[in-house]
Amino acid sequence: VQLQASGGGLVQAGGSLRLSCAASGSIFSINSIGWYRQAPGKQQELVAQVTTGGSTFYAGSVKGRFTISRDNAKNTVYLQMNSLKPEDTAVYYCQSYLQRYYRGPSGDYWGQGTQVTVSS
């Protein structure tokens, strides 16, 4: 299983970026998929997540600014980030809790990080 993340970059404060993460490989079911981030010197935090049923979670610091969406047919998740702030600067990681085989165990899978830098 691979999670391929893309869409990071450098943007000015107030700008927007859209991250994408495509899951590929042997996947039976994706239970949840979302984004974590880690800024230098800080702990990793869950930014946003969407479940199979469509339930979403957002960190308090991004509510109202970030929107997570999912294309089940493509096993892809998107994170639309608007009104970006310098404190959003971090490496963003795609993460999924998924099941590879019918009746198989579920487990965590991670993509490579993508850098998001917001300048003031």
Image (tube, helix red, strand yellow):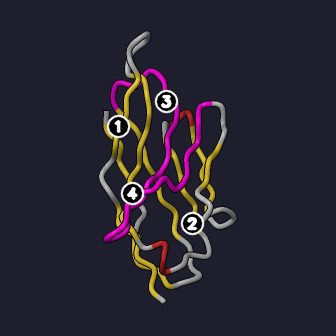
Numbered tag placed on residue 30 in the rendering: 3
Q: Secondary structure at mark 1?
A: strand
User: Disc 1 and disc 4: Cα gap in Å?
Assistant: 15 Å
User: Disc 2 and disc 3: Cα gap in Å?
Assistant: 23 Å
Q: Which amino acid type is marked by label 4?
A: Gln
Q: Which amino acid type is marked by label 3?
A: Ile
| Residues under numbered marks 2 and 3 in contact, where contact means CB atoms less than 8 Å apart | no
Task: Name the spot of residue 2 as percent of width and height, x first.
Answer: 31, 38
User: Disc 3 and disc 1: Cα gap in Å?
Assistant: 10 Å
Sequence order check, earlier mark of 2 and 4: 4
Numbered tag placed on residue 44 in the rendering: 4
Q: Which amino acid type is marked by label 2?
A: Met
Q: In front of the other: label 4 or label 3?
A: 4
User: Disc 2 and disc 1: Cα gap in Å?
Assistant: 23 Å
Give the residue drawn at x 59%, y 36%.
51
| 88 is higher (above) or lower (below) than 7 | below
Q: Which residues are magenta?
A: 25-52
